Amino acid sequence: MSTDKNTREFLEGLFKQGPALKIIASCLTSTIKSYTKTPVVPGKPMLREAKNAPEIAVAGLIRLEGSDFSLELFLGFSKGLFLHLYENMFQIAESEITEENQDLAGEILNIAFGAMDPEFRKLGHSFRSSFPIVHSGKKLEQALSKVKGTAIAIPYSCGSQDFVVEIYAMDSLQQTWNFDSKGVA
């Protein structure tokens, strides 16, 4: 069986497993609402092929590595939405995405994992989380060009703007992941 077929079958199985997707969607929703004080509403998850999204200006990526399966999450924002979330969280208006402020995309994933972890444990899954990776500009273009395969996409609406969280199988994002040596898998 080919790797692409294995990846698609894995994601289709996860897609049918409602509790795992609900955990990811609800924890990301509550993290964004709580920390950025911005209402967001998750939509219906869908399977789709990886694609380059030119509207994405900054993205956070994180890997959740478990003993029975691993996931890679991609959280991308348009410039306007990202700066809106940043201003809501820090009460500081920024006009550009910078090396300093772009870390918010990774922090959202890191905080959301902290909420996901106990919920996954209730289902019998134990994960360790990589350190988040954040890309913008040319680094984001390069990262997007390496993404392969199928993703589970969870669309979110945030006022008049939308964003998508994509869930990939292991090694689909083609990143080098770093883990805290204390992490438990």
Image (cartoon, helix red, strand yellow):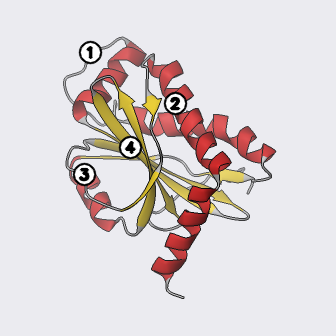
Q: Which residue is mark 4?
A: 164
Alpha-carbon neighbours of circle 3 within 10 Å: few (<14), some, or many (≥20)?
A: few
Kindly state the secondary structure of the residue where label 1 is placed. loop
- Which is nearer the eye, 179 or 163? 163
Q: Which residue is mark 3?
A: 53
Kindly state the secondary structure of the residue where label 2 is placed. helix
Q: Earlier in the sequence, mark 3 or mark 1?
A: 3
Residue at the image position 53 percent from the left and 35 percent from the top: 28
Query: Is 94 located above or below residue 175 in the figure?
Result: above
Look at the numbered discs 4 and 3 and tell me whether their residues touch, using CB distance below 8 Å: yes
Q: Earlier in the sequence, mark 4 or mark 3?
A: 3
| Residue 176, visible in the rendered structure | yes
Q: Where's residue 141, x and y in %?
A: 23, 56
Q: Earlier in the sequence, mark 1 or mark 4?
A: 1
Query: Is 130 located above or below residue 151 in the figure?
Result: above
Look at the numbered discs 4 and 2 and tell me whether their residues touch, using CB distance below 8 Å: no
Q: Which residue is mark 2?
A: 29
Instruction: For marks 4 and 3, give the CA distance.
Output: 10 Å
Q: Earlier in the sequence, mark 4 or mark 2?
A: 2
Picture quadrant of residue 101:
top left
| Labelled disc at residue 158 | none
Kindly state the secondary structure of the residue where label 4 is placed. strand
Q: Please indicate whether residue 54 sits to the left or right of residue 70 in the image.
A: left
Q: Residue furthest top?
A: 91
Q: Where's residue 173, x and y in %?
A: 42, 62
Instruction: For marks 1 and 2, give the CA distance.
Output: 23 Å
Q: Earlier in the sequence, mark 2 or mark 3?
A: 2
Residue type, numbered disc 2: Thr
| Labelled disc at residue 93 | 1
Residue type, numbered disc 4: Val
Look at the numbered discs 1 and 2 and tell me whether their residues touch, using CB distance below 8 Å: no
